Amino acid sequence: MGWIERFFAPAFDRFREQAPEMATELATAVLLVEVARADHKVEEQELATIRRLLLERLSLCEEEVDSLLQQAGEEADHLVSLQHITRRMNEQLSQQEKLRVVEMMWQVVYADGEKHHYEEHLIRQVADLLYIPHVDFIRARHLAEQG
């Protein structure tokens, strides 16, 4: 990879060689930020839910999560394709871990008490790209609706 490609590569590609787990954590955070932005309004409850989920699910301290969220926002600003992120996740995560990402996305959607069709469409795309069966997609949505 030449210097131009390295310069323009998303952060999760740059992290891949140094810290593969960090690339996956960043990819997860980017997807959570993307689903919060999908309805064109990011609510405080959504941001608080993202932060809480990252603290609960990842072995990071608060400062690391804050840094990860800042970087995820920057990556989401430049995101061109979901395939780039989901390809990495398919390479590095188990089926259960990928399902957990979809579950987290649904929790962000319902953090503000309402589901927008743009949010659902985004999660459906991600679930398809992560090879999540439709039944698991629906189950994750129902758990988030109830929780």
Image (cartoon, helix red, strand yellow):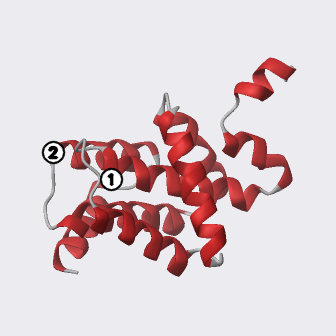
Determine the secondary structure under disc 2: helix
Using the rendered view, name the quadrant where residue 2 is placed: top right
**Residue for badge 2:** 117
Q: Answer with the quarter of the image where residue 84 lies.
A: top right
- Residue 131: x %, y % from top left: 44, 49
Q: Quadrant of the N terminus?
A: top right
Quarter that holds the C terminus: bottom left
The secondary element bearing badge 1 is classed as helix
- Which amino acid, mark 2? His
Please determine whether, in this image, residue 26 is positioned above or below residue 58: above
* Three-letter amino acid code at the position of disc 1: Ala
88 in relation to 68, above or below? above
Say which of marks 2 and 1 sits in front.
1
In front here: 137 or 5?
A: 5
Residue under the image location 37 percent in, 71 percent down = 49
Query: Label 1: which residue?
Result: 36
Residue appearing at x 17%, y 72% in the figure: 145
